C-alpha cells in the first residue's frame, strides 16, 4: 500500500511540475514553490481566469495583463501576490475607491471584482519603502481589474509604472515586454 501511495504522489507531482512549466515556471522556481492549499488552488485557476478575461477584453489587453502579472508577482510567487492577488496595485487613499476613481464604476457594477481592503504590511521592491496595496478576494478580481485599467488607458502598459522612478515608463514597458505570456499566446 505504501508503494502505491508513493507512486501516486510521484506521478501527481510530476504532472504538477509539467503543468507549472507550461505556466512559465523554471525547474528552480517549481522547486521553490510553497505548496499550501490556497496558493495551489490559485495556481490551477490562473489559466481559466486568463481565458475568461479573453472573452471580455481584447487579446492584446489580456496578453499585456498576463505579462504585467508575471512581472509584478515574480511569476505568481511573491508574498504580495499570494496575500493580495494584486499586480502591485497601490492605494492612494484609505477609502473606496482607494484613489482609483477611474475604476469606481467598474467595481460598483461588478462587485465580484471590487477590492476587499488594503494591505499596508509590504515594502516596495524598488525603493524599500512601505507601500499600501489594494487587496482582492482572488486572482480573478485582480486580473479583471488590471484588464479594465488597461482598457481605460488604451492598453498603455507604461502607465502602470511607479511615477517616482526615473525613466520609469520606458524601463517598465521594456521589462513587461521581456515577459512571456504563454496562456494568452495559446488563446490567440
Image: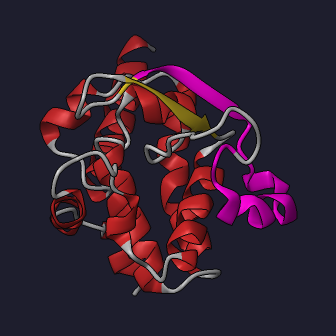
**Residue 87 location (% of width, % of height):** 45, 48
Q: Which region of the structure is painted magenta?
A: 98-122
Q: In which quarter of the image is residue 60?
A: bottom left
In this view, the residue in front, 102 or 45, is: 102
Q: Can residue 33 be seen in this view?
A: yes
Q: How many marks?
A: 0
Residue 183 seen = no
- Residue drawn at (48%, 61%) of the image: 47
Q: Is residue 19 above or below residue 156?
A: above
Residue placed most toward the observer, 96 or 27: 96
Left-right relation of 95 to 173: right
Classify residue 103 as left or right of residue 132. right
Find residue 118 and report its horizontal and vertical position in percent: 64, 30
Q: Residue 20 in the image: state x and y as whole percent.
A: 32, 48
Q: Work out whether residue 162 or residue 176 is closer to the camera in this orientation and state it.
A: 162
Does residue 31 appear to the left or right of 2 in the view shown? left
Q: Residue at x 66, y 65 (%)?
A: 102
Residue lying furthest top in this view? 2
Identify the image quadrant of the N terminus.
Answer: top left
Residue 103 image offset from top left, x and y in percent: 68, 62
- Vertical arrangement, residue 180 with respect to residue 7, above or below: below
The answer to whether residue 157 is magenta is: no
Q: In this view, does 120 lie above or below 151?
A: above
Give the colour scheme shown: secondary structure
Residue drawn 51% across the image and 44% down it: 86
The residue lying toward the viewer, choosing from 166 and 149, is: 166
Q: What quarter of the picture does the C terminus occupy?
A: bottom left
Residue 117 is covered by the magenta coloring: yes
Amino acid at each position: 500500500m505504501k508503494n502505491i501511495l508513493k507512486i501516486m504522489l510521484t506521478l501527481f507531482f510530476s504532472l504538477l511540475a509539467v503543468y507549472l512549466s507550461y505556466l512559465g515556471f523554471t525547474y528552480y522556481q517549481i522547486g521553490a514553490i510553497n505548496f499550501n492549499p490556497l496558493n495551489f488552488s490559485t495556481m490551477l485557476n490562473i489559466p481559466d481566469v486568463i481565458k475568461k478575461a479573453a472573452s471580455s477584453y481584447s487579446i492584446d489587453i489580456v496578453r499585456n495583463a498576463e505579462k504585467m502579472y508575471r512581472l509584478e508577482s515574480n511569476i505568481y510567487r511573491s508574498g504580495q501576490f499570494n496575500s493580495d492577488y494584486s499586480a502591485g496595485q497601490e492605494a492612494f487613499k484609505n477609502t473606496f475607491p482607494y484613489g482609483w476613481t477611474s475604476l469606481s464604476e467598474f467595481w460598483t457594477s461588478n462587485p465580484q471584482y471590487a477590492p476587499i481592503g488594503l494591505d499596508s504590511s509590504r515594502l516596495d521592491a524598488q525603493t524599500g519603502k512601505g507601500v499600501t496595496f489594494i487587496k482582492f478576494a482572488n486572482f480573478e478580481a485582480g486580473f479583471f481589474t488590471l484588464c479594465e485599467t488597461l482598457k481605460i488607458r488604451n492598453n498603455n502598459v507604461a502607465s502602470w509604472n511607479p511615477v517616482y522612478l526615473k525613466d520609469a515608463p520606458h524601463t517598465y514597458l521594456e521589462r513587461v515586454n521581456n515577459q512571456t505570456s504563454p496562456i494568452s499566446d495559446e488563446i490567440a
